[in-house]
Image: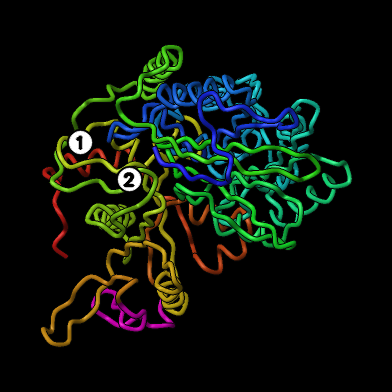
Amino acid sequence: MKYVKLAAIVLSIGMSFPSFAKLMQIIHTNDLHSFFQGSRSGKGGYAKIKTVIDQIRSDAAAKGIKSFVFDAGDFGEGSSYYFSNNGVDSLRALDLLGVDATVIGNHDFILGGKELSHQIAQANMRSKILSANMEGKIFMGLQKKVLDSVDFNLDGMKIRVFGLTTPEIHFQYSLLPNGFIGNSIKHGLAIEKKSKKEKVDLLVALTHIGLDEDMNLVSQSSDIDIVVGGHSHTRLDVPKMTQNKKGEIIPVLQTGAHGLAVGSLIVDVLGQGEYKLIDYRLYDVAGDISQDKTVKQFVDDAQVNREHYFNRRWDEVIGFSEIKLTGLYEGNVREPQSCWSHHIARLTRETAGADLGLQLDIFQGEEIPAGDIHFGDLIDNFPHFRKWGDAGWNISKAKISGLVLNQVLKYLGSGNHPLDATIDGASVLNQSKGTLSKFINKLHKAEHALVNGQKIDNLKFYTVGMPTEIPFAIGKFSPLIRDLLLRHSEEIPNSHFWPLFENYIAKNSPLRCLEN
């Protein structure tokens, strides 16, 4: 257990407080991604999260402290448990955890606003769902289901919580054309202005915009008191203390991802935006924590529902791998552009019959250790699909000009945080040895890339295999731009990833790193 003392007053058993104190506790999670059973390391799991939440709530209640539980979004897609009851159980689970309010994350509307509306209706939740910058709610059936903000009562004081969703453009395509996500800072400041007029006593921003944008929000704010955040999967053992426009220091909180930790902030609310930070602790959801019986039964039932959805034995062995099927380990990619990434790029290129194959590590799910590979591992490692009943995303082939291809390769390798992209079919010449080696966008310059052993010709067209979701997403924004960048884009028949992975691993078992 890690914690930081934030003020001279620190809670302890038997400590008394002056009668004017309005103590409250914010218990928070973020980026749960339907990891009902926790990580393969034994950490996390909703039944243990519930135990932790109930214990810290009970401890606070014994000291006369009222608790609220907030979740900072991405409670939905990301794990194979999202397939339990067509995503509805991912929402119902929030009620079981005791969540008072959550914010919509980009993975929560991945199947579109109308599907999210259907899921919320089926879940019949007590938890309030927020997003102040989601536009077009009325056209998606979300106008009464996703609120801008919600007020809670703390012994006569008004605690307002408002939600902000990441407006990053590449996440919005599934909402189009009925809705979109507006500027988070603009909407946050508008809520702040309104709340000040209405004499709100404590204003909490419940955000799914990432740590950097949380700090940007605070820097432009005057009256937001606390930020409970998510999206960047950042574990903050100590709040990120950030200065606002008035020079005040505002705490930004985040617990990491996948339910591996639960945060607890205790404040003394004095009213009209005045408060004192008392204590902050991050509780690890360790493997030895007891499981809440009700939530454990819910997870057990979800496991059965998940297997029923696929009509396959989850533990059916399909092959053996000497390498890890890399992806997210405890919420973050730790081995980008790995051997497995190269296999996916190779599979994509060969299936499309293209010059190049493209794979982005941000598409991969949970990391799978080396050893026997089961059917369920494929879903956990690549839990992406466009609609219920699909066998995962599929593959498309498109023509791209050499001029555009050069620019794409430069973009993938540019900036302080270049994208973890693996490109199969591109190579570079080792001048000293006179041999070809893999082109790696982080290491090699785009002008040195070779395709089919030749320098890229700006006037020539090359074929590229990629997940269909890439041209599909671009086309939702602008079919014209898609057709200019990706000419003659076409889906490859019978190219869904899950059966392709299954056949590929069985055929190439034991799976090893590709030599070239």
User: In the rendered view, how is the structure colored?
Assistant: rainbow
Mark 2: few/some/many CA within 10 Å (<14, 14-19, 20+): some
Q: Is residue 40 above or below residue 316?
A: below
Mark 1: few/some/many CA within 10 Å (<14, 14-19, 20+): many
Q: Position of residue 62 (x, y in %)?
A: 57, 19
The residue located at (31%, 66%) in the rendering is 355
The residue located at (82%, 44%) in the rendering is 195
N-term mark: 2 or 1: 2
Please give left or right for residue 252 compared with residue 36 in the image.
Answer: right
Please give left or right for residue 268 compared with residue 85 in the image.
Answer: right
Please tell me which residue lies in front, 252 or 347: 252
Please tell me which residue lies in front, 279 or 13: 13
Report the disc number at residue 373. Answer: 1
Which amino acid type is shown beneath numbered disc 2?
Answer: Tyr
Q: Position of residue 187 (x, y in %)?
A: 75, 52
Q: Which residue is situated farthest in the right direction here?
A: 197
Q: Is residue 303 above or below residue 182?
A: above
Q: Which residue is situated farthest in the bottom direction here?
A: 432
Q: Position of residue 106 (x, y in %)?
A: 56, 45
Q: Position of residue 293 (x, y in %)?
A: 41, 12
Residue range corresponding to the magenta coloring: 444-461
Kindly identify which residue carries mark 2. 329
Badge nearest the viewer, 2 or 1:
2
